[in-house]
């Protein structure tokens, strides 16, 4: 069986997993249940009850559970078998970008590559530049892997990512977190209210 090592991360709901098997080259890629069929390893991990998000990088995989009510001791064996048995992930196919990066965006990417991403990868995370608003100097960054939803994510964003980017790219005045695209529940006020009630009193969510 493939050798597996589980590493804790600052996010109690995420594990960084290393294995003596090949992962595809290139930047980390994140998957959830909306991306079924995109990657065989991600599909195998997301088929495990309690796993809600997966990030596959060159040297590790980050697995995110649905909360502390799902014990890691229960998930670890299933994660190990999924990683050992899943076929190799295909190399990511890169299409042509919609538009080339501007000068400032490229500078931000260079800072992320050199100073930020190695630090985040050590904890099973990653950061993606979503956009740069030149009008007010705001860089929007999405936290992924163990960094997404991490209790210390806001500190990492401000003290780590923002300080690094502003030091080397003075055109950036602040860095804000870009949230994932809103789902139907957050668009529908009634669904949002039902979810609030369910969370407050520990009831199962409808639908």
Image (cartoon, rainbow, N blue to C red):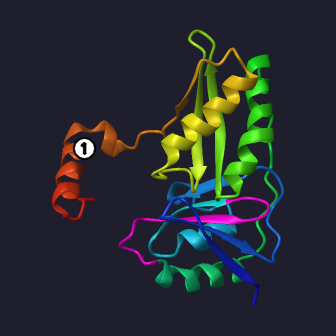
Residue 40 horizontal side relative to residue 53, left or right: right
Residue drawn at the location 40% of the way across and 44% of the way down:
183
Q: Position of residue 33 (x, y in %)?
A: 51, 60
Residue 132 horizontal side relative to residue 193, left or right: right
Residue 56 horizontal side relative to residue 203, left or right: right
Q: Position of residue 111 (x, y in %)?
A: 77, 33
- Asked if residue 38 shows in the view, the reply is no
In this figure, which residue is indicated by the disc labeled 1? 192
* The image quarter in which residue 113 lies: top right
**Number of numbered markers:** 1
Residue drawn at the location 19% of the way across and 64% of the way down:
203
Q: Is residue 177 above or below residue 173?
A: below
Q: Is residue 63 above or below residue 171?
A: below
Q: Quadrant of the C terminus?
A: bottom left
- Report the magenta residues as a range: 56-71
* The image quarter in which residue 105 lies: top right
Q: Is residue 145 above or below residue 107?
A: below
Residue 203 horizontal side relative to residue 187, left or right: left
Q: Quadrant of the N terminus?
A: bottom right
């Amino acid at each position: 069986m493939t050798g597996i090592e589980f590493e804790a991360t600052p996010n109690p709901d995420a594990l960084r997993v290393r294995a003596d098997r090949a992962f595809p080259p290139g930047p980390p890629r994140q998957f959830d249940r909306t991306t079924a069929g995109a990657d065989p390893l991600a599909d195998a991990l997301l088929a495990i009850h309690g796993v809600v998000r997966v990030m596959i990088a060159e040297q590790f995989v980050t697995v995110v559970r649905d909360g502390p009510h799902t014990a890691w001791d229960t998930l670890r064996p299933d994660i190990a078998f999924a990683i050992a048995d899943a076929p190799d992930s295909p190399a990511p196919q890169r299409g042509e970008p919609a538009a080339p990066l501007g000068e400032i965006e490229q500078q931000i990417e260079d800072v992320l590559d050199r100073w930020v991403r190695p630090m985040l990868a050590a904890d099973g995370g990653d950061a993606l530049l979503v956009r740069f608003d030149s009008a007010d100097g705001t860089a929007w960054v999405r936290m992924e892997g163990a960094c997404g939803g991490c209790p210390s994510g806001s500190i990492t964003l401000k003290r780590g990512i923002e300080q690094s980017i502003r030091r080397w790219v003075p055109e950036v005045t602040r860095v804000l977190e870009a949230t994932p695209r809103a789902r139907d529940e957050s668009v529908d006020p009634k669904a949002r209210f039902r979810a609030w009630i369910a969370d407050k009193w520990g009831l199962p969510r409808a639908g």
